[in-house]
């Protein structure tokens, strides 16, 4: 994500759903109607102009701008039918594969491998962000650390 007014990158993230669905979820949360959204550094930093003053004041941090100045773009992606080729670039040793098999997420083993690759790219992009500009309070690797879907 990029703040188009300040011209800085502010977040690296990924989605397990479609980008369209994720954008709809982000926009909805930017109105700060739920406690979860109010506790999000991202949504509190860039609330929607349509959010009430009360909801904005209950956010976890001061606003740096508004949701309309946030640009969302894809930095890394691949075509679904190329996943097998991409997976061959990585070492999937027995320990890793057993860990993926034991993971309780309701995904196929292949989908779990894809999520691991996505999280690797997400982490690499995250490391490129200035800590002072990073608005993500997301721990990353949610599927594997137990916070996915919370």
Image: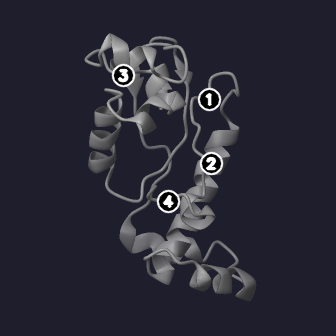
Vertical position of residue 89 compared to residue 28: above or below: below
Residue 142 percent location from the top left of the image: 56, 58
Q: Which mark is residue 134?
A: 1
Sequence-wise, the earlier of marks 2 and 4 is 2
Q: Secondary structure at mark 1?
A: loop
At 49% from the left and 74% from the top, the residue drawn is: 105
Residue holding disc 3? 67
Estimate how packed mark 3 is, as few (under 14), some (14 to 19) or many (20 or more) residues with alpha carbons within 10 Å: many
Q: Which mark is residue 148?
A: 4
Tell which of 86 and 125 is nearer to you.
Answer: 125
Residue 121 percent location from the top left of the image: 60, 53
Residue 13 percent location from the top left of the image: 51, 45
Tell which of 100 and 130 is nearer to you.
Answer: 100
Sequence-wise, the earlier of marks 3 and 4 is 3
Vertical position of residue 3 compared to residue 111: above or below: above
Observer-side mark, 1 or 4, equals 4
At 42% from the left and 53% from the top, the residue drawn is: 15
């Amino acid at each position: 994500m990029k703040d188009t007014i300040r011209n800085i990158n502010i977040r690296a993230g990924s989605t397990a759903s479609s980008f369209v669905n994720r954008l709809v979820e982000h926009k909805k949360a930017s109105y700060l109607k739920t406690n979860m959204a109010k506790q999000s550094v991202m949504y509190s930093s860039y609330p929607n102009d349509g959010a009430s003053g009360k909801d904005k004041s209950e956010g976890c941090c001061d606003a740096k701008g508004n949701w309309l100045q946030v640009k969302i773009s894809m930095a890394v992606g691949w075509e679904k039918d190329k996943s097998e080729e991409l997976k061959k670039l990585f070492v999937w040793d027995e320990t890793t594969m057993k860990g993926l098999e034991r993971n309780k997420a309701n995904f196929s083993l292949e989908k779990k491998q894809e999520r691991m690759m996505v999280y690797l790219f997400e982490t690499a992009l995250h490391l490129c962000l200035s800590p002072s500009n990073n608005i993500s309070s997301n721990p990353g690797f949610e599927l594997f650390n137990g916070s996915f879907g919370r």
